[in-house]
Structure formats: C-alpha cells, structure tokens
Amino acid sequence: MRGLPDLRGITHLCHPPVLGAAQQTSSRILDMTGLKGTVTKPGPLRLHCDDYEPEGRVVQMRHNWSVYDLPFEELEKGYAHLRTALTEDGWRIVSDGPDTSKAKTPTMVADAPGGDHSAEIRLMDNRKDEDPTSVLAVTVVSRCFQETPGASPAP
C-alpha cells in the first residue's frame, strides 16, 4: 500500500496467529474512534510478500474496513479522537495530513507498538458527490511473517 512503511524486511514465525491479531488490532482501532456507525464486514486477507523463498510461505495479513452511515462531522471527530488515542496507546504516527489526491483527503499512517502492524486511516468527505456517504476508511497491515511449517494456512 502506498504510504505505509515497507514491512517486507521483517519476518517472524506465525506465533500468535497473525489472522487473529489483525482482527484484534482492527477492533481496537474501531474502539479508539468512539464511532457507532455501520462497519463493513470483510475480515483480514492473507497476502504473499514478494522477494522471499520459499515462495508462498512468507505472508502478511491485510484488513480493509470502513465506518459509514454517520454525519461527516461525527466521522471527523472520530478521526481526531483516533489521532490522540493511538498515541496514548503507544502507536507512532509516521504521517498525518492531506494525501496528494485532488480531494486532499486527510490521511494518517501509524505503526503499532512492537511493529507488528501498521494502519492507514483516511477521512473521506463525500458530501458533494453523487453518493454523499462519507467514510472513515482503515487498512491494517501486518508485518511479513514466515508461516510455521505444517501449520494450516489462514483463509
């Protein structure tokens, strides 16, 4: 993902299961926003990390989700609250400001304590669009890890 740190150089064995950790990280971020809107349902995906041997055994988890069905002003407050809550929870905010798009979407990238996850948070103001549903979009990405031999792969 553009804007997130390159995590491919960091590997570890799959202990504890990274799938559950990605879900927990996402849940924690949602709690930090304080928002009570509708949350998209898809869970984390297992993706291969490039440039590693044996092929297919070095993977990362990626969890894209968003909160919507709230007034933009509430999403904006949740975004601001998240900035403070992440820092208080030990996260390191590595970038914070508008992206380079025409919309200048507010975007924050943060690294979790211990470096196991990074998150990109975007506050998408769609009030002037044909579909005026504004969104707080979050992508949580785990570091790359080598799956334990013989372990069943994550879905």
Image (cartoon, rainbow, N blue to C red):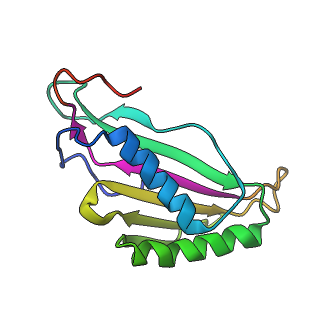
Pick the front one: 118 or 52: 118
Instruction: Give the residue displayed 75% in from the left and 67% down from the top.
Output: 72
Residue 103 falls in image quadrant: bottom right
Label the magenta part by its dominant secondary structure: strand
Identify whether 57 is placed above or below 118. above
Residue sitting at x 58%, y 76%: 80
Q: Is residue 139 left or right of residue 9?
A: right
Q: With respect to residue 131, does 77 lie above or below? A: below
Note whether 84 is above or below 120 in the view shown. below
154 to the left or right of 45: left
Query: Dividing the image into 4 quarters, which one contains the C terminus?
Result: top left
Q: Position of residue 3 (x, y in %)?
A: 41, 58
Total of numbered circles in the picture?
A: 0
Read off the magenta span. Answer: 135-147
Quick one: 73 or 149, which is closer to the camera?
149
Give yes or no for residue 55 being in the magenta stretch: no
Q: Position of residue 82 (x, y in %)?
A: 53, 71
Residue 2: x %, y % from top left: 42, 53
Q: Is residue 145 magenta?
A: yes
Q: Residue at x 57, y 37 (%)?
A: 42
Q: Nearer the viewer, residue 32 or 48?
A: 32
Q: Residue 133, image x and y in percent?
A: 78, 54
Mark yes or no: residue 3 visible. no
Q: Residue at x 47, y 44 (%)?
A: 63
Q: Would residue 59 be seen by someone viewing this image from the given angle?
A: yes
